[in-house]
Image (cartoon, grey):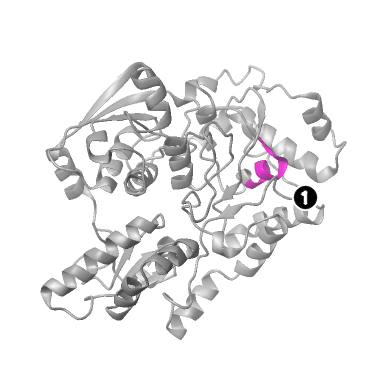
């Protein structure tokens, strides 16, 4: 199958219109990559930007290593040139992909992946994926719901098969938090990556110090099969400079997802430098990692943040301090009043505004080992204090199978007690569950703090 990019990768004013996806719900213009294209806008009559290739890369482009690899190279190069990349860089660590679901919308991607696999190509290293879109043993337990989700993800088997052909690890390693120790896909500082899962890009860039743009699902796998990615945006020193100083001045430890939401809505895809939260976090450890994950994921979903720096905490902020602030940076203060305003301004998206909750979801992105323990203790203690035998509505704790196995090994009695009171553990994705057609008419989900 030909990978036709002519309609979207042209380097002219149509490209500007296509790639700048705004206005988004917050009224901002945003590419979604974690990188602004402002510096590569040009006169449409001027020659399109071209990156420099090595002889080996040009040979691949010219088809000397096969037609399929040439297609990959041409597509990746055009993608990079659209964003002003100067060159390609070799990738390290292990890949991760967001493309775990299979339905009719991804048939072209499945076809491309199969063409690569048929040509004997694989990712440059074994890779992890986001979680499967269903868990028929814990979430979709009713036959009618099982039927609906299997209809919704009717290409799931095809997607999973081609990933295994391309070098994916087994399904125990499928998690949006691939960087937890149990899963083991935690790239070293400075490693170049081509990842797409927004919270994993955000965490690995920020907490681990690796380098990846927020790639789209599909293009990141083409990069990972090629073993190279375009060098632009968050992969460059300049692109990692912070355009915002975020001063957190709350009187008590805030809810981290609300802090992240506030930051994301304010800075959109710019890089923030966050000051004032090291007093709550201490150092990067098993407890603070979960808080950083929650905060970062909220910056990535409420905006399009692919990288944040935390003063005295994250590696580049420790090494460079406030020298990371770009010239002309803006300042945003988050105090108690701002936290309260952001919480109150979140809209009620339920189809029936006054409905009663039917399920509680905790773990998007997937929980860490410590977060499972923390939630387990909170729930069991709260029920005991109230003299209550069961949770009022089903509570689902989302986590990797490998993290759950660790938790079960260390705290088997707590797992038993949680299951007895109506809590279960699932390795799927809450968003894909909520995406079952019609489910939001009858199911009303809440998250807990």
Report the residue that reaches farthest toward the front.
Answer: 410
- The correct choice, above or below, for 204 with respect to 111 in the image is above
Residue visible at 22% across and 71% down?
380
Residue visible at 63% across and 18% down?
45
Q: Is residue 188 left or right of residue 25?
A: right
Residue visible at 34% across and 61% down?
372
- The correct choice, above or below, for 247 with respect to 141 in the image is above
Q: Look at the image and tell me whether residue 102 can be seen.
A: no
Residue 94 image offset from top left, x and y in percent:
61, 45
Q: Secondary structure under badge 1?
A: loop
Disc 1 crowd rating (10 Å Cα; few below 14, some 14-19, many 20+) is some
Q: Which residue is mark 1?
A: 121
- The correct choice, above or below, for 139 with respect to 196 in the image is below
Q: Is residue 222 magenta?
A: yes
- The correct choice, above or below, for 222 with respect to 370 in the image is above
Q: Is residue 51 magenta?
A: no
Residue 76 image offset from top left, x and y in percent:
67, 37
Region in magenta: 221-228
Which is nearer the eye, 84 or 18? 84
Q: Is residue 219 left or right of residue 252?
A: right
Q: Is residue 105 left or right of residue 273?
A: right
Q: Look at the image and tell me whether residue 1 can be seen.
A: yes
Number of numbered discs overlaid on the protein picture: 1
Q: Is residue 85 left or right of residue 60?
A: left
Which is nearer the eye, 447 or 401? 401
Residue visible at 68% across and 23% down?
51
């Amino acid at each position: 199958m030909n990978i036709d990019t002519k309609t979207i990768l042209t380097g002219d004013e149509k490209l500007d219109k296509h790639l700048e996806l705004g206005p988004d719900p917050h009224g901002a213009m945003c590419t979604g990559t974690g990188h602004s294209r402002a510096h590569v806008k040009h006169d449409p009559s001027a020659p399109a930007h071209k990156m420099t290739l090595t002889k080996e890369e040009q040979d691949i482009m010219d088809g000397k290593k096969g037609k399929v690899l040439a297609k990959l190279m041409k597509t990746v190069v055009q993608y990079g040139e659209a964003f002003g990349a100067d060159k390609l860089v070799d990738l390290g660590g292990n890949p991760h992909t967001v493309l775990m679901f299979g339905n009719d919308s991804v048939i072209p991607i499945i076809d491309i992946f199969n063409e690569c696999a048929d040509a004997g190509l694989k990712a440059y290293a074994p890779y992890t994926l986001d979680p499967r879109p269903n868990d028929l043993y814990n979430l979709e337990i009713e036959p009618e719901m099982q039927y609906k989700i299997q209809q919704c993800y009717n290409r799931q088997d095809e997607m999973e098969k081609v990933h295994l052909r391309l070098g994916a690890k087994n399904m125990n390693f499928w998690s949006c938090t691939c960087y937890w120790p149990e899963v083991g896909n935690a790239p070293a500082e400075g490693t170049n990556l081509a990842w797409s899962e927004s919270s994993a890009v955000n965490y690995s860039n920020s907490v681990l110090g690796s380098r990846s743009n927020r790639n789209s699902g599909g293009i990141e796998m083409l990069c990972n099969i090629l073993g190279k990615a375009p060098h632009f945006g968050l992969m460059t020193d300049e692109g990692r400079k912070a355009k915002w100083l975020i001063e957190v001045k709350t009187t008590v430890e805030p809810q981290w997802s609300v802090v992240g939401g506030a930051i994301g809505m304010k800075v959109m895809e710019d890089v923030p430098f966050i000051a004032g939260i090291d007093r709550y976090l201490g150092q990067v450890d098993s407890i603070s990692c979960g808080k950083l994950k929650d905060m970062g994921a909220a910056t990535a979903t409420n905006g399009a943040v692919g990288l944040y720096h935390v003063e005295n905490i994250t590696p580049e902020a420790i090494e460079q301090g406030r020298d990371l602030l770009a010239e002309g940076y803006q300042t945003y203060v988050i105090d108690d009043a701002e936290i309260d305003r952001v919480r109150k301004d979140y809209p009620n998206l339920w189809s029936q505004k006054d409905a009663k909750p039917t399920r509680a979801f905790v773990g998007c992105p997937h929980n860490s080992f410590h977060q499972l323990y923390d939630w387990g203790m909170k729930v069991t203690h709260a029920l005991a204090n109230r003299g209550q035998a069961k949770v009022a509505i089903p509570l689902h704790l989302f986590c990797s199978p490998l993290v759950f196995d660790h938790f079960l090994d260390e705290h088997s009695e707590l797992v038993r007690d949680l299951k007895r009171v109506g809590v279960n553990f699932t390795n799927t994705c809450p968003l894909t569950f909520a995406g079952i057609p019609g489910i939001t008419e009858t199911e009303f989900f809440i998250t807990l703090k």
